[in-house]
Image: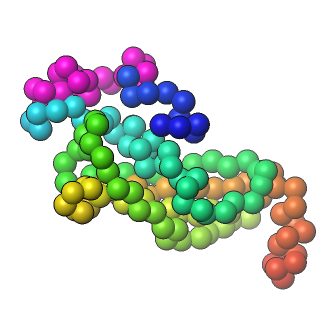
Amino acid sequence: MGDLYPFSLNDKLERITELSPWYTAEAGATSPWGRAIIPLEMLSVLTQYSSREAGFKMKGPAVGLYADQEIKLIKGPLFVNQPYRLEREIVCLSESRRVESNWIMTRVYDVDSNELLAECLLNSATLKASYAKYEEEAAALGKVI
């Protein structure tokens, strides 16, 4: 899944703590959908691995973290080896005394039907004190620190 996630689904399945047989190609055929499903914890990987291509600019270098994430399956599970189309948008900007956040909604669509299948809302936060130019750039914008 690229540089951000240098492991495969099979690598993850070797270490996953709550392995379902439906996650594997072999036993996935016995699932109610007749094929392997993507583990819930891998949906964040699916929705974020191409996030750099979105063009959302971040200041840095700085310490960033995922502060919160909500995954919503709208129509069943997502499947292994199934093509999906992702659409992303920043739905909110927020800040506290120490952190600036952007809330990114990624929607997962079926490539053929264009049907919305899942959504992932991610709070991507940056620690203000970790960005060396934070105070200087904030002051230039007229922001009271």
- Residue at 39% across, 28% down: 9
* Residue 37 visible in the displayed image: yes
Q: Residue furthest top?
A: 14
- In the rendered structure, the answer to whether residue 135 lies left or right of residue 65 reads right
Q: Residue furthest front?
A: 112
- In the rendered structure, the answer to whether residue 64 lies left or right of residue 93 reads right
* Residue 74 visible in the displayed image: no
Q: Residue furthest right?
A: 136
- Residue at 87% across, 78% down: 140
- In the rendered structure, the answer to whether residue 57 lies left or right of residue 41 reads right
Above/below status of 88 relative to 7 = below
Give whichever of 99, 79 is nearer the camera.
Answer: 79
Above/below status of 135 relative to 10 = below
| Residue 126 in which image quadrant | bottom right
- Residue at 49% across, 27% down: 7
Give whichever of 8, 30 is nearer the camera.
Answer: 8
Residue 12 coordinates in the image, percent (x, y): 42, 25
Q: Residue furthest bottom?
A: 142
Within the magenta stretch, is there residue 16? yes
The colour scheme of the drawn protein is rainbow
User: Start and end of the magenta stretch?
Assistant: 11-31
Q: Number of labelled discs? A: 0
Above/below status of 27 relative to 37 = above
Above/below status of 19 relative to 137 = above
Residue 16 coordinates in the image, percent (x, y): 39, 23
Give whichever of 59, 64 is nearer the camera.
Answer: 59
Quadrant of the drawing holding the C terminus = bottom right
- Residue at 85% across, 70% down: 137
- In the rendered structure, the answer to whether residue 107 lies left or right of residue 131 reads left
Residue 51 coordinates in the image, percent (x, y): 53, 53
| Residue 20 in which image quadrant | top left
